[in-house]
Image: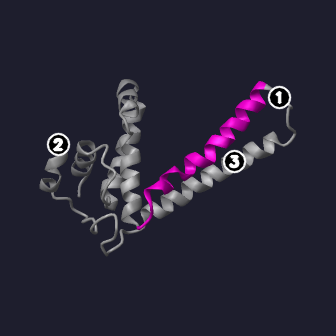
């Protein structure tokens, strides 16, 4: 699967969370999505599309490696309390002597969870069919996705 094909498949089915995504579909789309995010108007439009396409492709890639898509939320679950503590500390400096330590640990946990997520997304897809669907081929047949156009 080439870059254009992978990006095209992902954009045609941007809100499809079912099935499993092959590695090329995920790894070609992620840099494209990041570059589009740098363009002010295009970045705003793609980020406001419900749900963001990056979440859907990450969810499907998790299925491809045999994990639940809910693991995609783990880095978010780590950063939310950290940002809450940081905002409280900014509003009331010195309210807790442990706040800087908690913020530091929270950001370390977030970075660690993102690194772990990336390592797991690099793994090859499971070669057998599972509850999320059949083994994703490395080359997608565009005719299989006509229903999502």
Q: Identify the residue under disc 2.
A: 149
Image height check: is 141 above or below 83? below
Disc 1/disc 3 C-alpha distance (Å): 18 Å
Rendered image quadrant of residue 95: top right
Residue at 17% from the left image edge and 52% from the top image edge: 145
Circle 1 packing at 10 Å, graded few (<14), some (14-19), many (20+), is few
- The residue lying toward the viewer, choosing from 118 and 52, is 52
Q: Position of residue 73 (x, y in %)?
A: 51, 50
Question: Does dot 3 land on a helix, a strand or a loop?
Answer: helix
Disc 2/disc 1 C-alpha distance (Å): 52 Å
Quick one: which residue is furthest to the left in this view? 143
Mark whose residue sits in front, 2 or 1: 2
Circle 2 packing at 10 Å, graded few (<14), some (14-19), many (20+), is few
Q: Which mark is residue 106?
A: 3
Image-based side of 50 in relation to 139, left or right? right
- The residue lying toward the viewer, choosing from 104 and 71, is 71
Mark whose residue sits in front, 2 or 3: 2
Name the N-terminal-most of marks 2 and 3: 3
Assign the N terminus to one quadrant of the image.
Answer: bottom left
Tell me where the magenta segment starts and ends, as one range.
66-91
Q: Identify the residue under disc 1.
A: 93
Name the N-terminal-most of marks 1 and 3: 1
Q: Position of residue 102 (x, y in %)?
A: 76, 45
């Amino acid at each position: 699967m080439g870059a254009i094909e992978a990006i095209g498949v992902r954009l045609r089915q941007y809100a499809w969370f079912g099935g499993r995504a092959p590695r090329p579909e995920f790894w070609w789309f992620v840099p494209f999505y990041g570059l589009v995010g740098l363009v002010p108007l295009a970045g705003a439009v793609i980020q406001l599309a419900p749900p963001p396409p990056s979440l859907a492709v990450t969810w499907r890639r998790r299925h491809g490696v045999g994990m639940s898509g809910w693991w995609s939320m783990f880095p978010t679950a780590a950063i939310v309390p950290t940002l809450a503590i940081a905002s409280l500390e900014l509003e009331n400096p010195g309210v807790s002597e442990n706040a800087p330590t908690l913020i530091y640990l929270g950001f370390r946990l977030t970075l660690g969870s993102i690194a772990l997520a990336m390592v797991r997304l690099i793994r090859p897809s499971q070669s057998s069919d599972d509850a999320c669907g059949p083994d994703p081929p490395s080359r997608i047949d565009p005719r299989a996705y006509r229903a999502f156009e």
